[in-house]
Image (cartoon, rainbow, N blue to C red):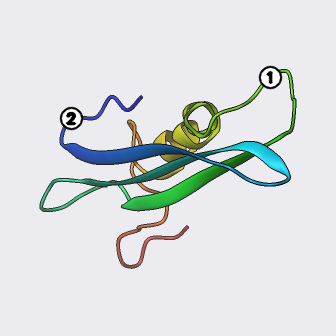
Amino acid sequence: MFNAPGFDFFGKTGTLESQRFEPLSLFLFGGREAKAKPRACPIVGIVYVESDRGAAERLTGVSVFADVVAPVLRERYGWGDKPCLLVRPAGEAP
């Protein structure tokens, strides 16, 4: 998912039961670059997916993370080839 050596990434999947929805799919994640001067932003988050009862197809938190969240982390937060856009050297214009 991330082609970046030197990154620490942790994820945990889970399923919850609910009275209105079944099942609730979760993916909890966090990560950071394990370097003295990282170029990537540290991250932490939760993907929470509710499915209607009896739905034919169900998205999972992991699939939403892989298809939606991970590309944004690679593009804007330094988890790919580009540096984190939230961290700029002093005096550099946005």
Asked if residue 33 lies left or right of residue 77, the reply is left
* Front one among 37 and 66: 66
Q: Find the residue positioned furthest to the left.
A: 36
The image quarter in which residue 69 lies: top right
Earlier-in-chain disc, 1 versus 2: 2
The image quarter in which residue 64 lies: top right
Asked if residue 41 lies left or right of residue 49, the reply is left
- Name the spot of residue 33 as percent of width and height, x first: 25, 52
Which residue carries the number 1 mark? 57
The image quarter in which residue 63 lies: top right
Q: Residues within 10 Å of mark 2 (few under 14, many from 20)?
A: few
The residue at 44%/71% (across/down) is 92
The residue at 39%/50% (across/down) is 83
Secondary element at tag 2: loop
Which residue carries the number 2 mark? 5
Secondary element at tag 1: loop
The residue at 41%/68% (across/down) is 88
* Front one among 67 and 38: 67
The image shows residue 37, relative to residue 93, as above or below, that is above
Which part of the image, by quadrant, shows the C terminus? Answer: bottom right
C-alpha span from label 1 to label 2: 35 Å
For badge 2, the amino acid type reads Pro
The image shows residue 83, relative to residue 74, as above or below, that is below
**Badge count:** 2
